[in-house]
Amino acid sequence: MLVSEHKDVILFPEIHSLEDYVANPPEGMEWVDGELIEKTGMTLKHSEIQFNLGFYWRSYINSNQQGGKVYTEVPCRTKKQGRYPDVAYLTAELVAQFGDVPTLPQSFPLIAEIVSPTDLAEDLFLKAQEYLQSGCEEVWLVFPESRLVFIVTQNQIFGFKAGDVVNCSKVLPGFTLAVNELLG
């Protein structure tokens, strides 16, 4: 990111297409419908949940020697957009295949989006469908204020509320997590 002489003007590398975005994704920006859109609305609670989920997924893959990597705020390409999922898991096979590309050229197999105060629920479910149509197998939608977690797959949606234990992961078989533990 370059800063101009005017302190409040930020210049990004020339990005005119999804391909430009994939080659050089600006941090915290998504390519949506032909435009760069800044991800906004991150709160302390959002960040805490993002960390918690990344930690629990990482601990699980390490303890089960499943391999792969867990990322936060990392770019990927869907069939038509450039996205920055809040938390994402990449299998060992896909880590070996894609290594250090600037942007994953498909959706991650497992993605979580933590709802920010500025997000619309309809938009998040549409984003989940977009991920699923681009190689993702499972999307977690975490609603901190209402204390709900939805897990969306190609043909099912599972809902969990405070007091429940999430226990239906397709990508991390056997993984369980109490909603209260995730949401703090």
Image (cartoon, rainbow, N blue to C red):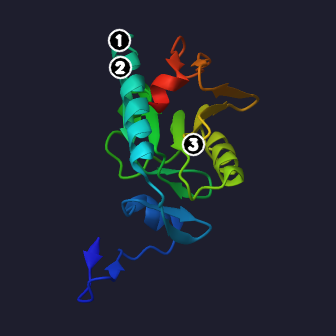
Q: Whole-Å distance between the Cαs marked 2 and 3? A: 26 Å
Numbered tag placed on residue 145 in the rendering: 3
Q: Amino acid at mark 3?
A: Glu
**Crowd band around label 1 with a 10 angstrom C-alpha radius: few (<14), some (14–19), many (20+):** few
Q: Amino acid at mark 1?
A: Ser
At a point 53% along the width and 45% down the height, the residue shown is 106
Displayed quadrant of residue 145: top right
Q: With 111 as the anchor, is 15 left or right in this view?
A: left
Rendering coords of residue 16 (x, y %):
49, 75
Asked if 120 appears above or below 143 in the picture, the reply is below
Q: Which residue is mark 1?
A: 63
The quarter of the image holding the N terminus is bottom left
At a point 40% along the width and 48% down the height, the residue shown is 74
Q: With 36 as the anchor, is 51 left or right in this view?
A: left
Asked if 130 appears above or below 172 in the picture, the reply is below
Answer whether residue 3 is visible to the viewer in this image: yes
Q: Secondary structure at mark 3?
A: loop
Answer whether residue 107 is visible to the viewer in this image: no
Q: Whole-Å distance between the Cαs marked 1 and 2? A: 6 Å
Q: Whole-Å distance between the Cαs marked 1 and 3? A: 31 Å
Rendering coords of residue 151 (x, y %):
64, 30
Of residues 80 and 6, the one nearer the viewer is 6
